[in-house]
């Protein structure tokens, strides 16, 4: 599995660098996984957190360059510590021992081989909680295929519906095409939503979409596209927590907060289509106090 790093094509950028020999591609990741923080995270969707929280593992570096990134210290600047596969497996098991409802792997794509090896080791040592692939959505179908049997729940962002937004805000003009293609592969792989009696999600796909200021119509078009492609086979989480951080001030209208009208019009569009598996957020979800501290 580690041989995949010798000519790295894990994400749609397909840089082709040899990460085992010190090469670094667009994401900046190296041979070992770099982790910024592990924690019980209570601010994920309710079906993922249970009584004590999701067992979040925040990986450093990222395949995107979102100008409004709320975790830019780790995604862009690479803050964190390198961990061997053995150490990763131990961290996964420690989160389960603390009562985590799920193992929440945050921004994991560029560390796929290391994570799969660590998961195999952890499962042989007693890991049983559902594994969540909490991804930016910028994936390849080939990488999703590698995860079959290892990942129970896919939690992809679906950021944009247009080439222009992907190019302008994340340096990825192919984002929408790649993300929808990967999403189809996710749904085909894990199938219908499966819940425990207490409402915890055990298997399936939960798509997140952060509504951006000034992009209400794009969000509505994206929601309609999701409904037409997948119907009730997925859950949708419509997020209103946008906060102008990092370089957002340089990219109006991202310099301002989302308005209530903008957010509620997207929620109304989802409901008008007939969507029932939808999470929505109240205005209290906005603010930096909900962001993990990576210092």
Image (cartoon, rainbow, N blue to C red):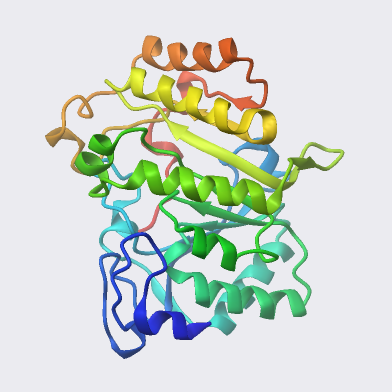
Residue beneath the point at 16% across and 27% down: 252
Task: Please state which of residues 204 and 61 is positioned toward the viewer in this rendering.
Answer: 204
Residue at position x 50%, y 64% in the image: 142
Query: Is residue 148 found left or right of 267 in the rendered image?
Result: right
Please provide percent x and percent y for residue 230: 61, 33
Residue 217: where, in percent of width, then height? 35, 18
Q: Is residue 258 visible?
A: no
- Horizontally, residue 195 falls left or right of residue 93, namely right
The quadrant where residue 120 appears: bottom right
User: In the current view of this chain or complex, which residue is farthest to the left?
Assistant: 250
Comparing 136 with 44, the one in front is: 136
Residue 134, visible in the rendered structure: yes
Establish if 52 lies above or below 130. above
- Please give the name of the residue rendered at 45% of the width and 80% of the height, measured from the top-left corner: 4
Height in image: 267 above or below 177? above
From the top left corner, tell me how far across and down residue 260 is, in percent.
40, 12
Q: Is residue 94 above or below residue 71?
A: below
Q: Going 34% across and 15% down the picture, which residue do you hit?
A: 259
The number of numbered discs placed on residues in the rendered structure image is 0
For the residue pair 21 and 124, the one nearer the viewer reads as 21
| 29 lies left or right of 150 | left
Splitting the image into 4 quarters, where does residue 205 fall? top right
Q: Is residue 291 left or right of residue 237?
A: left
Instruction: Relative to 90, say whether 80 is above or below.
Output: above
Q: Residue 89: where, in percent of width, then height?
A: 62, 76
């Amino acid at each position: 599995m580690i041989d995949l790093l010798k000519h790295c094509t894990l994400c749609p950028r397909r840089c082709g660098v040899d990460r085992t020999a010190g090469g670094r591609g667009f994401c900046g990741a190296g041979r070992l996984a770099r982790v910024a923080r592990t924690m019980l995270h209570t601010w994920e969707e309710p079906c993922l957190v249970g009584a004590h929280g999701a067992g979040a593992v925040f990986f450093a570096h990222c395949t995107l360059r979102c100008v409004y990134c709320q975790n830019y210290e780790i995604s862009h600047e690479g803050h964190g510590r390198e961990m061997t596969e053995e150490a990763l497996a131990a961290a996964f098991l420690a989160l389960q021992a603390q009562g985590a409802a799920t193992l929440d792997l945050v921004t994991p794509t560029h560390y796929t081989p290391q994570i799969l090896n660590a998961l195999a080791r952890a499962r042989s040592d007693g890991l049983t909680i559902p594994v969540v692939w909490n991804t930016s959505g910028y994936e390849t179908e080939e990488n999703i295929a590698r995860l079959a049997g290892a990942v129970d729940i896919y939690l992809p962002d679906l950021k944009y519906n247009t080439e222009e937004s992907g190019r302008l805000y994340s340096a990825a003009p192919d984002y929408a095409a790649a993300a929808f293609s990967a999403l189809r592969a996710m749904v085909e792989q894990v199938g219908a939503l499966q819940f425990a009696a207490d409402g915890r999600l055990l298997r399936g796909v939960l798509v997140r979409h952060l509504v951006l200021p000034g992009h209400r119509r794009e969000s509505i078009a994206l929601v309609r596209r999701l409904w037409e492609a997948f119907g009730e086979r997925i859950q949708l989480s419509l997020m209103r927590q946008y906060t102008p951080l990092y370089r957002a001030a340089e990219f109006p209208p991202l310099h301002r907060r989302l308005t209530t009208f903008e957010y509620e019009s997207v929620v109304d569009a989802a409901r008008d289509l007939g969507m029932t598996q939808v999470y929505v957020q109240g205005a209290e979800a906005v603010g930096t106090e909900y962001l993990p501290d990576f210092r």
